[in-house]
Image: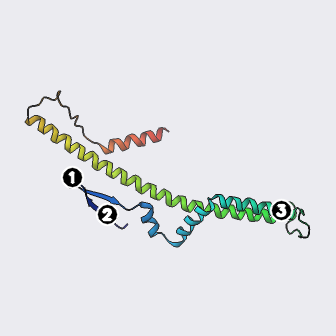
């Protein structure tokens, strides 16, 4: 996997602020033509326009093939076998296209979750470091713990992961 493009800017506090390109934009720029087509078609098929076109086409087909339009010969008389075949094929292709898009969306969500976890771990480590420094300052200034309590604790990722897995197994 390629490294992410990172933009660093300065703020008043002279600390760099890191902004990352959108996961969706980055993955979209690297996906193949079939995935791009699936995303486009999913967006199109999920629209009200597509629903109206399906309803209109189905209504016209039924009116036509029930013989309600004089002058047009019926090509698919009741029980509408050709219509059933077309609708079934449409459902198959729609399902495949939507599944392709959902798979990509799930991949983006997994990447975001992993990044969130890594950021949370880093922040927790920083907080632990700050609390340890605060405790050292308290000792240096002879401040008793009941006056300022930093509540320093050890961050145990394995214990947290084990608890999450246990909770998932119980559900």
Reply above or below: 32 against 116.
below
In the image, 166 versus 106, the foreground residue is 106
* Mark closer to the chain start, 2 or 1: 2
In the image, 70 versus 166, the foreground residue is 70
Task: Decide if residue 111 is on the left or right side of residue 33.
Answer: left
Q: Which mark is residue 80?
A: 3
Tell us which disc is closer to us: 3 or 1. Answer: 1
Tell us which disc is closer to us: 2 or 3. Answer: 2
Residue at x 22% of width, y 54% of height:
12
**Where is residue 56 shown, x and y percent of the image?**
75, 61
Residue at x 86% of width, y 69% of height:
75
Task: Decide if residue 10 is on the left or right side of residue 42.
Answer: left
**Where is residue 161 shown, x and y percent of the image?**
37, 44
Pointer 1 local density, CA inside 10 Å: few below 14, some 14–19, many at least 20? few
Q: How many marks?
A: 3
Instruction: Classify mark 1: helix, strand or loop.
Output: loop
**Where is residue 90 shown, x and y percent of the image?**
69, 64
* Mark closer to the chain start, 3 or 1: 1
Task: Decide if residue 41 is on the left or right side of residue 51.
Answer: left
Instruction: Classify mark 2: helix, strand or loop.
Output: strand
**Where is residue 171 shown, x and y percent of the image?**
50, 39
Residue at x 29% of width, y 42% of height:
156
Q: Do the residues labelled 2 and 3 touch (CB within 8 Å)?
A: no
Q: Residue 6 carries which label?
A: 2
Pointer 3 local density, CA inside 10 Å: few below 14, some 14–19, many at least 20? some
Reply above or below: 13 against 69.
above
Residue at label 1?
13
Instruction: Classify mark 3: helix, strand or loop.
Output: loop
């Amino acid at each position: 996997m390629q490294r992410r493009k990172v933009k660093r800017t300065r703020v008043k506090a002279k600390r760099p602020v890191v902004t990352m390109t959108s996961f969706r934009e980055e993955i979209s720029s690297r996906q193949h033509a079939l995935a791009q087509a699936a995303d486009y078609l999913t967006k199109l098929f999920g629209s009200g326009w597509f629903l109206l076109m399906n309803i209109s086409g189905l209504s016209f087909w039924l009116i036509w093939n029930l013989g309600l339009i004089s002058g047009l010969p019926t090509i698919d008389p009741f029980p509408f076998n050709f219509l059933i075949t077309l609708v079934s094929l449409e459902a198959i292709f729609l399902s495949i296209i939507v599944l392709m898009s959902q798979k990509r969306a799930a991949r983006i969500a997994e990447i975001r979750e992993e990044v969130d976890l890594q950021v949370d771990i880093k922040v927790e480590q920083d907080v632990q470091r700050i609390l340890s420094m605060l405790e050292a300052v308290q000792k240096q200034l002879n401040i008793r713990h009941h006056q300022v309590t930093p509540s320093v604790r050890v961050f145990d990722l394995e214990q947290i992961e084990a608890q999450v897995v246990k909770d998932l197994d119980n559900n």
